[in-house]
Every structure is written in C-alpha cells, then in structure tokens.
Amino acid sequence: KKHMIKLYSCLMQDTLSDIVSLLSFKEAARMSVLSSQWRHLWRSCIRDLVFTRETMCCPMPMSREEQDREAFIRNVECVLCQLDPTIARDKFVLEFKLINTNVQTHVDRWVAFCATSRVKHIVFDFKPGSWGKHDNSFSFPLHLFIDGAPAVSSLCLMSAYLNPLPGFCGFTNLRKLK
C-alpha cells in the first residue's frame, strides 16, 4: 500500500511538472503560492524565460526611467539566481531599453546563464524606443559558448555587437540569426 501511495505521489509530481512546464513564467510563479509543495516546482519546470518590462517591472511614469531600469535588472538577477542553470531551457528572451546604462557585467551573466542552460532560442533586444536615442551597443560575449554551442538554433540580437575571439567555432546548429 505504501508503494502505491509513493507511486501515485511520483505520478502526480511528474504530471504537475508537465503542466507547469506549459505555463508562462508569470503563471508558474503565481501557481507556486498555492501550495508549499509547489513553491519551488517552477524553478525546474519553466523552459521559457521571458524578461520584458511588462513581466519584470511595475508600470512607472517615464520620468522614472532610471528606477525602472534598476528594478528590471534587479528582478532579472533575482529570478536567475533562483534557477538551476544546468537545466536545459527552450527560450531566453530579454527585451528592455538599457540604453546609456553600464550593464555589460549583467549581460555577461545573463549570456553565461544561456550558455550553461543550453538555451535553444536566445533574444537580447536592447533597442531604443520611447526611451531615447541609441548611442551605444552591448558586446555579446561569444566566448561563453564553447564547442560550437550545439543547443542554440536561433539568435536575435538588437543593439548588440559580436566580437568573436580567434578560434570561435560559431553556432553549429544555428538556423536563424537576426
């Protein structure tokens, strides 16, 4: 009887993990507060990480751009530090206007997470919009991807530049570059 209960519990956990993996990041975070047993489940189940102003910041007046940028960076860092970087992810999207901000160390950390997590689809969009003119770009640290980065199948970079080091093999399975 105990074996059946344990089997049922494992089956429920696997089914729940499958369900959570289909949820958006925001939905999974909300679901995690429903049960103490589910509190940390989202950390290993979420395959698509989407960081945008809408998902990571409270709406603020445009006059508070600097506080908004700081909150965005802080929130992304907080989420990533809770995730296991060795679990493969399908998508990593980071869209935010980080113009005139010294964020290269953050970008390096975020790209390192992508490389370690073997992310398939990567989007880094720092393009300017209503946040002002674009007067700098960010270096996308290609050196963090070793062995041809076989997991990466699409890479979209806006307001970023590539500066490959000697010996960089490229992305062996890249199907889309934008």
Image (cartoon, rainbow, N blue to C red):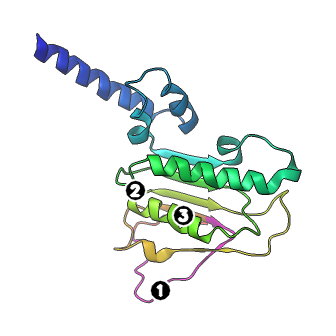
- Quadrant in which the C terminus appears: bottom right
Residue displayed at 72% across by 67% down: 101
What is the span of residues highlighted in magenta in the rendered image?
Answer: 157-172
**Residue 109 is one of the magenta-drawn residues:** no
Q: Amino acid at mark 3?
A: Leu
Q: Which residue is mark 1?
A: 165
Q: Is residue 123 left or right of residue 135?
A: left
Quadrant including the N terminus: top left
Q: Which residue is labeled 3 in the image?
A: 155
Q: Residue at x 68, y 70 (%)?
A: 102
**Does the segment drawn in magenta span residue 171?**
yes
Of the pair 155 and 108, the residue shown nearer to us = 108
Dot 3 crowding, Cα within 10 Å, few <14, some 14–19, many 20+? some
Q: Residue at x 45, y 56 (%)?
A: 120
| Mark closest to the chain's N terminus, 2 or 1 | 2
Where does the image place residue 147, in percent across and percent down from the top left? 34, 74
Q: Earlier in the sequence, mark 3 or mark 1?
A: 3
Above or below, 62 against 38 in this view is below
Q: Name above or below for residue 43 compared with residue 119.
A: above
Q: Which residue is mark 2?
A: 117
Q: Amino acid at mark 2?
A: Ser
Q: Where residue 80 sits in the image (x, y, percent)?
A: 49, 51
What numbered label is drawn on residue 36?
none
